[in-house]
């Protein structure tokens, strides 16, 4: 009996523990469905407003973690002093969730900004987020005072002072700030000391801080930008091998404290050279093979731009075989040989993979299929990792997406890591929508066409079939948007010509690699010899063949009228007077390897096409153009590139080509030193145009300013226009000019050239100055 008593006690204890566990399990709300969520103890806030902040929902399993996150969100609103969660059993083994809140005792009855003369109360309310009638929170009011101070400092009032005199205690009912604004401080000058490698003008291009123009325009001083400027200058030097560079600042104020003079003191230190490049972690390829892909060499200066290019080439080399690698650069200062660094590329190889699911996030307007065809990655295909960079480049190229978060550079395509047991990797595509519509009013002037105005309505993410179903669609910007199409209406009235066009472009017709462009137009221009009017439309189907090559077929249907002739007009022009109906079909190819469309420094472009025209006239036109760019020299930081360019145009047309489709030369982007259409076959002083044109130009650009926005150019233009295929009366001109890029006017708005004819033809009309100026507001 006594021997079995301990066993019985143990048995009873076990049963008790099991019962307690069962009872606890029955009482815990974790995992049970939520029957309802009920806010309690509120006075000023509404239940709907409180519930809008929580993720705990009826019909979902109860999660203590989610509930605590809800508490933190409610506290972050600064509506409540305290929030706690309680649960109660409900019917059918469900649970009621109570959010018991404790509000601040008083509400805000008045907000005063005493001493604020240069910022309106409405703007300050926006800055602080404070509102009358809301619960008074001393913590929120202290944060509001700090926000007001930041606002004044951002506006250049660096000596501003903000004090919270009421609203810092729970018993207060008013919020009162005493503000001393102080003067606006302008940057009177930015200087550098100790810099030998880079000139001060070049270093200023790295700064966000700039000097005020004429002492008052722009150049508002913001102390918060100084630390960022120091980081940018430091990074500039380290990128070029100055690994021990040190940068500090010195501020000097004028006597009235309205101007500040900033001096950045630099200790550049030595510029390090590469002692040895080493690759580690590689298993698939030997080090010698991978080193052959690099341009970082022993004995040369360290250059992070070259290092990054090495890493990209190695990553692509693996990636083209479907293998993913992570490559990190490590730089070690060599203690034995000062001035040298050891550069290591650390490679982490992974097994080849295939594309799994492609998930798209952030597109609130643009259709998924538009993004998928730009990304070009589909489930099941071999995941070649250079395609990730291509996908991001494609998303950036169309210009309709922002980054997924504010401040991010652009759309992001990420390979999501799997657990290692599957060869499939999901792809995450993150985009942000950005404004794609614009309405522009502008004016331009150039030596070829005189003064003109411009009215442009453009939408770069158009959707022809997304008709608004409600007024909300229009307000939200969803109407006629989201298919990646482009729609543009342009009206250009002018003193010498006018043009009115509407263009619709579908970049991927039926989600295929083909594009479609339709453009009706009206054009009117007065020349010395006659007045030309065109009314018609163009239809173009294009196909991107490779990254460089593309092809297109274009048809035009138009009515052309030639008028305003006089008694002395030669027969070769007069015979084309009146109206003609034409249909033309052109087949063309393009190859483009330029590094930039705005200011190419390397690469080339080639375009050739043949058009056959039928109707009231029947003739063919063969045109081609080739342009090549070379960088001859540059600064050590790869800016300040001197660029040599060569352009050649060859055009041949049939004998029956009417005067309005013949070739002419002279003027900007042709043979400078001659008037627009001032070169060509002449009869009685009238330019009759030619059926053969051969134009060539050599130009050399030299940057003048450190920010590469102002260039000096010299050029040699030459060519001929003839009535048959023959190179005779070959004209030559030479000259100089400037190119000025002003951000407010666009990337390349101003060109001014002075051309001097060296070899002229009979009847040619000379012009010393050729210029082009255009801007939009």
Image: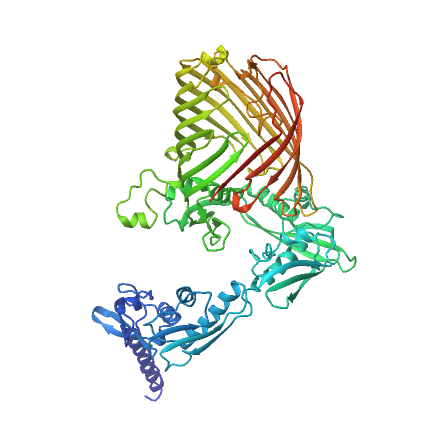
> At 40% across and 51% down in the image, what residue appears?
362
Q: Nearer the viewer, residue 59 or 7?
A: 59
Q: Is residue 406 above or below residue 720?
A: below
Residue 568, above or below 512:
above
Query: Which residue does the image show at 62% across and 21% down from the upper left?
Result: 719
Farthest residue to the bottom: give it. 2
In the displayed structure, would residue 612 be above or below residue 756? above
Judge by depth and name the residue closer to the eye, 490 or 142.
490
What colouring does the structure picture have?
A: rainbow
- Using the rendered image of the protein, determine whether residue 460 is visible from the camera's viewpoint: yes
When asked about the image quadrant of residue 439, the answer is top left
Residue 381 location (% of width, % of height): 46, 40
- Percent across and percent down for residue 741 are 58, 43
- For the point 42% across and 27% down, the residue is 523
Image quadrant for the N terminus? bottom left
Q: Residue furthest front?
A: 567
Report the front residue among 573 and 619.
Answer: 573
Picture coordinates of residue 469, whole percent (x, y): 26, 45
């Amino acid at each position: 009996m006594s021997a079995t008593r301990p066993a019985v006690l143990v048995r009873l204890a076990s049963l008790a523990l099991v019962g307690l566990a069962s009872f606890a399990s029955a009482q815990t709300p974790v995992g049970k469905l939520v029957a309802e969520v009920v806010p309690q103890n509120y006075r000023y806030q509404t239940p709907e407003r409180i519930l809008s902040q929580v993720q705990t929902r009826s019909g979902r399993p109860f999660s203590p973690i989610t509930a605590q996150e809800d508490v933190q969100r409610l506290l972050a609103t600064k509506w409540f002093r305290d929030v706690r969660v309680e649960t109660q059993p409900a019917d059918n083994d469900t649970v009621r969730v109570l959010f018991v809140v404790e509000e601040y005792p008083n509400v805000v009855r008045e907000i005063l900004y005493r001493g604020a003369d240069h910022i309106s109360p409405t703007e300050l309310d926006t800055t602080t987020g404070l509102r009358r009638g809301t619960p008074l929170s001393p913590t929120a009011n202290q944060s509001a005072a700090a926000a007001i101070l930041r606002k004044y400092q951002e506006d250049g009032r660096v000596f501003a002072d903000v004090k919270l005199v009421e609203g810092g205690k729970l018993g207060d009912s008013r919020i009162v700030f005493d503000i001393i604004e102080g003067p606006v401080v302008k940057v009177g000058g930015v200087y550098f000391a100790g810099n030998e490698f880079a000139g001060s003008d070049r270093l200023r291009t790295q700064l966000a801080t700039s000097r005020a123009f004429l002492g008052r325009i722009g150049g508002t001083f913001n102390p918060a930008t100084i630390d960022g400027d120091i980081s940018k200058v430091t990074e500039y030097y380290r990128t070029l091998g100055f690994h021990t560079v040190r940068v500090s600042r010195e501020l000097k104020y004028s006597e009235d404290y309205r101007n500040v003079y900033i001096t950045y003191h630099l200790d550049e230190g030595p510029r390090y050279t590469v002692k040895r490049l080493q690759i580690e972690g590689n298993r698939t390829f030997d080090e010698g093979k991978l080193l052959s892909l690099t341009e970082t060499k022993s004995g040369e200066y360290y250059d992070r731009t070259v290092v990054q290019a090495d890493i990209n080439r190695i990553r692509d080399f693996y990636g083209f075989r479907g293998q993913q690698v992570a490559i990190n650069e490590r730089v070690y200062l060599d203690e034995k040989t000062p001035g040298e660094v050891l550069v290591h590329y650390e490679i982490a190889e992974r097994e080849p993979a295939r594309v799994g699911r492609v998930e798209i996030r952030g597109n609130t307007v643009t259709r998924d299929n538009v993004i998928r065809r730009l990304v070009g990655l589909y489930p099941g295909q071999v995941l070649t990792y250079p395609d990730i960079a291509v996908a991001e480049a494609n998303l950036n190229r169309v210009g309709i997406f922002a980054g997924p978060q504010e401040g991010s550079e652009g759309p992001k395509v990420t390979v999501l890591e799997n657990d290692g047991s599957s060869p499939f990797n999901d792809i995450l595509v993150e985009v942000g929508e950005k404004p794609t519509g614009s309405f522009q009013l502008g004016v331009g002037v150039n030596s070829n066409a005189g003064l003109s105005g411009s009215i442009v309505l453009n939408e770069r993410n158009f959707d022809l079939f997304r008709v608004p179903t409600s007024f909300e669609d229009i307000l939200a910007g969803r109407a006629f948007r989201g298919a990646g199409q482009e729609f543009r209406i342009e009206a250009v009235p002018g003193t010498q010509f006018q043009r009115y066009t509407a263009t619709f472009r579908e970049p991927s017709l039926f989600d295929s690699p083909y594009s479609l462009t339709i453009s009706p137009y009206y054009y009117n221009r007065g020349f010395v010899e006659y007045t030309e009017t065109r009314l018609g439309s163009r239809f173009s189907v294009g196909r991107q063949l490779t990254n460089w090559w593309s092809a297109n077929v274009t048809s035009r249907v138009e009515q052309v009228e030639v008028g305003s002739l006089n008694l002395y007009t030669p027969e070769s022009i007069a015979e084309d007077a009146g109206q003609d109906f034409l249909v033309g079909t052109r087949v063309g190819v393009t190859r483009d390897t330029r590094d930039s469309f705005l200011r190419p420094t390397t690469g080339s472009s080639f375009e050739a096409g043949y058009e056959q025209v039928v109707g009231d006239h029947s003739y063919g036109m063969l045109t081609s153009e080739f342009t090549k760019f070379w960088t001859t020299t540059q600064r050590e930081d790869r800016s300040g590139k001197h660029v040599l360019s060569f352009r050649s145009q060859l055009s041949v047309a049939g004998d029956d080509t009417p005067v309005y489709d013949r070739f002419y030369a002279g003027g900007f982007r042709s043979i400078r030193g001659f008037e627009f259409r001032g070169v060509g076959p002449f009869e009685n002083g009238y330019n009759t145009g030619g059926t053969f044109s051969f134009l060539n130009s050599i130009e050399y650009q030299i940057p003048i300013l450190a920010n590469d926005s102002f260039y000096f150019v010299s050029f040699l233009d030459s060519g001929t226009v003839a009535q048959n295929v023959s190179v005779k009366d070959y004209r030559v001109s030479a000259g100089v000019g400037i190119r000025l890029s002003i951000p407010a006017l666009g990337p390349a708005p101003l060109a001014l050239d002075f051309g001097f004819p060296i070899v002229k033809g009979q009847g040619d009309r000379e012009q010393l100055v050729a210029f082009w100026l255009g801007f939009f507001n």
